[in-house]
Amino acid sequence: MSRRAGIPAIVLASIWAGAVQAQPVTACDRLAGLVHLPRVEGEPGVYALRDPDEAIRACEAAATSYPAQPWFKLLLARALLVANTADPRAIRLYTEATEGLPALAAAHLGVLYEYGYAGLPVSDRTARDFYRQSCEHWPDPQSAMGCTGEAVLMIEGRGGDTDEANGFRLLDFACREGWGPACVEQAYQIELRGEGGPDDVAALFATGCEAGDLLACSQLGFRYELGEGAPLDMGRAQALYRQACDGGEPQGCSNLGEIYRSGLGVQQDVVEAVRLFQIGCDGQDAYACLTLGNILIDGRGVPADARRARAAFDAACHLGDPEACDMVLEHH
């Protein structure tokens, strides 16, 4: 699987004012708070949950202490899905949160249907309907996630008629308004369709990275590594990968792992590469899982570990990498 590909992630972001800010910052906020638009203004949020079980306990406690506060239901749903993407409780929590957070909760319900999370069947049509409901609340910043989801489905003609022109306009507008994930999606879509050159793609990733989207930072680093749309600069690429990885973006760890595996601008260190690929694989990056398996199955610079290699191949196969599925059969 190419390192160009990004794994769609559940991007959680919201703004809440007035009465919400009067409530104290809780452990739920610290462990599961949203990065782009936190519940309490000024709180940093969490890009990737390090300990979902602890976050679940904290958010359950917060939801009990503040039963009328929809935010804690939304954050609890986030933690539950990180622990288990099939957890059906997320459906009820997001549905209940729509009363106080209509734009944001509708966007999250759209994600559940688009990717088949929480035990729901995949339904692009239902996902598009929820994204549209969310986007109708624009210019509420909480609607940016829904607008981005709707735009992608419009461009790809999923769940309804194809409408590339309006889909791209919606992505461009959301990106210009500072919603980093929209910049990432816009970059992917114009690159896929050949509607923008390397400079355009790199510029969009740069804008997304500046807006705080760590997947954009990782993808921008890849452009510096290749010299596509940006000067060839391994030092800059490494710095962007590390920024993304340290912030919790698994693809950043995968790309940094490749730097150490291949000795690109650094001293080759396969042990460090394995550590980074494991982080990327745990974060559901198929490239990381496949590469980790290839290193471990033959002991390329580290002791061979067939059991761990097979687990990595199996993970990559489940993430949709056909080469990994072949490796599963070969090393069964």
Image: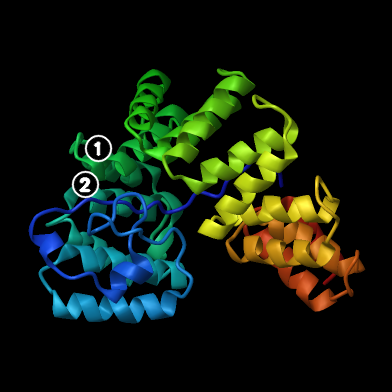
The answer to which of 125 and 317 lies nearer the viewer is 317
Judge whether residue 323 can be spotted in this image: no
68 sits left or right of 14 in the view? left
Q: Residue at x 90, y 65 (%)?
A: 301
Mark 1 residue type = Cys
How far apart marks 1 and 2 lie (CA) works out to 7 Å
Q: Is residue 330 left or right of residue 154?
A: right
Question: x%, y% of residue 77?
Answer: 32, 67
* Residue hosting label 2: 103
The residue positioned 58% from the left and 62% from the top of the image is 283
* Quadrant, the C terminus: bottom right
- Examine the rendering and report whether any part of residue 175 can be seen: yes
- Label 1 Cα neighbours within 10 Å, binned few <14 / some 14-19 / many ≥20: many
Q: Position of residue 277 (x, y in %)?
A: 71, 61
Classify residue 181 by image quadrant. Answer: top left
The mark that comes first in sequence, 1 or 2, is 2
Residue 103 percent coordinates (x, y): 21, 46
Q: Position of residue 131 (x, y in %)?
A: 30, 42
Query: Dot 1: what SS?
Result: helix
Mark number displayed over residue 76: none
**Color scheme of the displayed model:** rainbow
How many numbered discs? 2
Residue 54 is left or right of residue 102, and the answer is: right
| Vertical placement of residue 58 versus 224, above or below | below
- Crowding at label 2, few (<14), some or many (≥20) Cα neighbours within 10 Å? many
For disc 1, the marked residue is 135
Q: For this rendering, which residue is in front, 91 or 224?
A: 224
Identify the residue at image location x=39%, y=18%.
165
Q: Amino acid at mark 2?
A: Ala
User: Do the residues bearing badges 1 and 2 touch, measured as CB atoms within 8 Å?
Assistant: yes
Residue 235 against residue 276 in the figure, above or below = above
